[in-house]
Amino acid sequence: MSQQLLPVVQEFVNRVRRYFQQSYEETELWRRVCADLELLLKEPDLKKSCATWPDTKKGNGPPGNLLFYEDPDYKFVLNALVKTPLAETNIHDHGKSWTLYGVLEGGEHIQRWQRVDSNPRESGPAALKQDGAFNVTSGYIDLVPPWQIHQEKNGNHRTIGFIVRSQRSGTFDQYRYDTNNGSVHANRGPTQIPYELC
Ligand SMILES: [Fe+2]
């Protein structure tokens, strides 16, 4: 995979690498990355580039992620999820990973749940209680800590999430939840599609 990046994105990567080098505690590290991502989402070069990114989540089909960068030392990655109008995800978590999900274009409806059972995390059955529902638009960043359960429903337009993950999907288990019967399904997350961001 080419690791060449738009200059503004390379500068962002350099800052994130410095936070890792400074050994911040996880919550503080991702809070700092979040502040930098907020600025990156406003960059005209990035907005211009995303106009040609291909769709990676069509309707209720399986999700894919454009994969722009994987850090060789600290393992964080840069991804994008490009949803077609009205596409929606299933109810899921991102396992042990941290995720910053920044809305670069469009807007959608996000819902969150918490587990209210004490069954095994990986097998359930799971009982979920909704604990958040809100609309987001361009510029919003959803900071998703490990194990947080959520779902996104797109509006009637394209929506692009520019994503920073603590590690590449496919290298850890994450879980999908069925609220009808409480079943919990392990999976390896969105398909990774190497894509040059330059
Ligand atoms: Fe997600």
Image: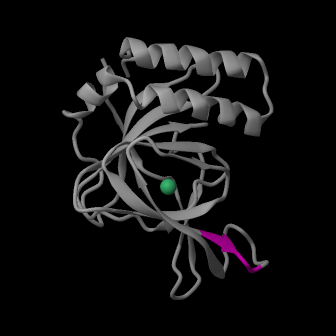
Kindly identify the residue that appears in the image at 47 percent across and 31 percent down: 78
Instruction: Based on the picture, tell me whether residue 115 belongs to the magenta stretch.
Output: yes
* Total numbered badges shown on the rendered structure: 0
Start and end of the magenta stretch? Answer: 113-117
Magenta highlight on residue 195: no
Q: Looking at the image, is 36 positioned above or below residue 188?
A: above
Left/right of residue 125 with respect to residue 187 in the rendered view? right
Chief secondary structure of the magenta portion? strand
Q: Where in the figure is residue 29, as x and y percent of width and height?
A: 71, 31
Quadrant where the C terminus is found in the figure:
top left
Percent x, y of residue 114? 67, 71
Residue under the point 47% across and 45% down? 140
| Residue positioned 58% across, 60% down in the render | 93
Residue 19 appears in which quarter of the rendering? top right
Vertical placement of residue 188 versus 70, above or below: below
Q: How is the image coloured?
A: one colour
Q: Is residue 66 above or below residue 172?
A: above
- From the top left corner, tell me how far across and down residue 134 is, in percent: 49, 64
Residue 171 appears in the figure? no
Q: Position of residue 172 (x, y in %)?
A: 60, 48
For the N terminus, the quadrant is: top left
